[in-house]
Amino acid sequence: MTHLGHFSVDRQAFGLYYQDSRAGGILFARTGGMRKALLGLVCMLAVFGMATALAPNGSSAIASVPVAVPMLEDRQSLANDRNDLSITLPAGKGRAVGDPSDSSSVEIEEEESPLLVGPGSLENFDIPVVFNEAVQYFIHFFTVEKRKVFTNWLRRSERYVPMIRDILRQHNLPEDLVYLAMIESGFNTRAYSPMKACGPWQFIYETGERYGLRVNHWVDERRDPEKSTIAAARYLRSLFNQFGDWYLAAAGYNAGEKRIERAILRHETTDFWELSKYNTLPKETREYIPQLIAAAIIAKNPEKYGFTNIAYESPIEFIRVQVPGGVRLETVARAASVEMAVIKSLNPELLTGITPPDAQSYAMKLPTGIEAQEFRENMVQALQNERKVKGFTTHIVKKKDSLPKIMKRYGVSYAELTLVNYCDGGLKTKQGSAIYIPSFYKQVANKSEEDVRTAGAPKTEVPAKHLEARNETPAVPKTAPKAEKKKEVKAFHIVKKGERLTDISEKYGVDVATLKEINRLKKDQIYPNMRIELVSKKMTQPRPAAKYHTVKKGENLSDISEKYGVNMVTLKKVNKLRNDRIMAGMKLRLPDKKG
């Protein structure tokens, strides 16, 4: 008789054990499906045992297969007899733990539901954290595929996270929302998206303006880490008040609250994970929350995921000092005895090389340790021989323009052009682009000292609440006399039925070739109601109106040449004639005096 093994039922674990008496192995199944599979496996073993017994070289036949089923065995002693085993299952099908090299024991668990980790647990997260396949995917994505990128995010995080956490706490928001800025921009203040979102919190212009971030030629406060965080905190609070759920609030921050509202109404659920099953939300938004959770998990314990030896940046610390408007940033750096790069790093919202000239003063951020009074005294000395910028005029680059030509025309240097142009990548003269020409205040004795005292006297440090962005528009500078003379005036002609380009050319005194170039016409063919743009007489000096002669019967080229005093060769060239033959009624263009 061959005794295969024993079944055991563990009512506490809701499981079914089977012990093989020959190999000493143990199989364990917890769920109904696994129990059925285990019973099927044992039946197969029984058939296999019978086949072995009936083989020609078998020593005995199996008359019966007894299976003992005790009521309950001691769970601890049974566990001591088992060895650990690990089986790797497909994602989402279960989890097994142990040593894959040992085949004496198998433990199989059914698929687990997502684990919700609330506040106060798992390293003190203050936003809900759910582990599921999407989160696990982005943990792998950030730690393997985008490891270098995430390393840079972690390196920059120490510079901004303490300040952002303070602001979020002041607005009674979960501090772990700081990781929204991480997945939005990697804490890059100069990040700019194809959708024209900007700054560490990636505000588009309209949303930034709604929450008080000023954007004009001189400043873009979406790039200010402090002011943009205050705006983001206000926006996130509004979204949470609307949806009552931080996942939906974060999704609304990414996709817009209106789109989230429509998705909720369409699918009749406020569960983000349920909404993410549909294509109603953009792919970016469906992946947004898993990215947030994955980034937070890694950033809270980077060493666990292999992020070691990172050269973290020092936390940002600064004081604020009022500086007159229109002052060069180079002058501010010299007065503070720091590098220009330090001033730009602390004030990333400044787009040009000067403080905004449309304001009497501007609150500059300077490194801690600088004495405000000493700085103001240095500024007084530095501004005595420096011209302050009051505005700019605009020059549209033409086909043959170059920087030297533009500088000579307006009497400015390259350094002065960089004061009012956004030129991180250098000034470029691309046809049709705009180059801004600075205009300056006249230098007045002791005026600089007066400006610095006026700007700096009220206070050195300004609380953040007084620095919330204002919706201001830059002052419109007075146009320089040269620019006024070159001011472009556009005019148009609406084509009437039967009109030709030559008719329009004669009417307005504009050459046909010029009309075709301006209106991008490949041929002379035009249509009724077409709008033809004309060259402004103030923009360019028009050529003299073309004169024509209608050939009369019996006339030849020699007669017409003598009549108008023009060279016959030139006459043929202007009219693209291959020979001297002309016909009555033909319209010949007469060359000007210059030929």
Image: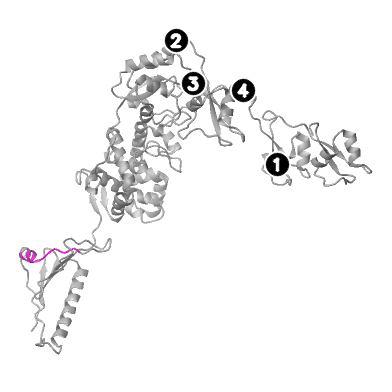
* Pointers 2 and 1 in contact (C-beta within 8 Å): no
Instruction: Name the image quarter holding the N terminus.
Output: bottom left
In the rendered image, residue 565, in percent from the top left (x then y), is placed at: 87, 33
Relative placement, left or right, of 384 versus 62 is right
Sequence-wise first label, 1 or 4:
4
Q: Nearer the viewer, residue 593 or 372?
A: 593
Identity of the amino acid at label 3?
Answer: Val
Report whether residue 164 is seen: no
Sequence-wise first label, 1 or 3:
3
Is 7 situated above or below 367? below
Q: In which image quadrant can residue 267 be found?
A: bottom left
Q: Residue at x 11, y 63 (%)?
A: 12
Q: In which image quadrant can residue 410 be found?
A: top right
The disc label shown at residue 446, or none:
2
The disc label shown at residue 516, or none:
1
Q: Which residue is mark 4?
A: 482
Q: Nearer the viewer, residue 260 or 187?
A: 187
Q: Look at the image and give the residue range highlighted in magenta.
A: 77-86
Q: In which image quadrant can residue 137 be found?
A: bottom left
Is 384 situated above or below 309? above
